[in-house]
């Protein structure tokens, strides 16, 4: 089990490269269970709006 960040690894956030649990990816990710955002790089408000599934969420931008 490698600990390095791998952009091709489906188990990491596309936004920041942090590992995201499979449960999070299943619930909040896209249809391929890929997470585009995670609690480490986005707010829960935006994640619940679909940001983790790759949707373009306009409101609540953190940065
Ligand atoms: Zn992230």
Image (spheres, grey):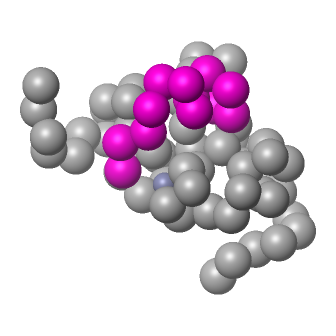
Q: Is residue 27 magenta?
A: yes
Question: Does the magenta run of residues contain 26?
Answer: yes
Q: Is residue 31 above or below residue 48?
A: above
Residue at the spot 36% in from the left edge and 51% down from the top edge:
17
Q: Residue at x 86, y 65 (%)?
A: 58
> In the image, residue 48 lies at what x, y percent?
80, 46
- Depth check: 24 or 62 in front? 24
Classify residue 30 as left or right of residue 10.
right
Can residue 30 be seen here? The reply is no
Residue 45 sits in quarter: bottom right
- Residue 2 in the image: state x and y as whole percent: 11, 32
Q: Is residue 20 left or right of residue 1?
A: right
Toward which corner of the image does residue 42 lie, by quadrant? Answer: bottom right
Looking at the image, the residue that sits furthest to the bottom is: 63
Query: What residue lies at 77% left-to-right and 57% top-to-bottom?
Result: 46
Q: Residue 29 location in percent, x, y?
A: 64, 31
Q: Would residue 4 appear left or right of 59 to someone viewing this image?
A: left
Q: Quadrant of the N terminus?
A: top left
> Horizontal placement of 47 versus 49: left or right?
left
Image: 50 above or below 46: above
**What span is colored magenta in the figure?**
18-30
Question: Which image quarter holds the C terminus?
Answer: bottom right
On the image, the x and y values in percent for residue 41 come to 53, 63
Residue reaching furthest to the top: 32
């Amino acid at each position: 089990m490698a600990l390095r960040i791998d952009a091709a690894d489906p188990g990491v956030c596309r936004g920041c490269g942090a590992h995201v649990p499979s449960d999070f990816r299943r619930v909040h990710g896209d249809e391929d269970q890929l997470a585009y955002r995670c609690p480490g790089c986005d707010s829960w408000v935006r994640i619940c709006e679909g940001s983790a599934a790759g949707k373009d969420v306009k409101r609540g931008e953190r940065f």
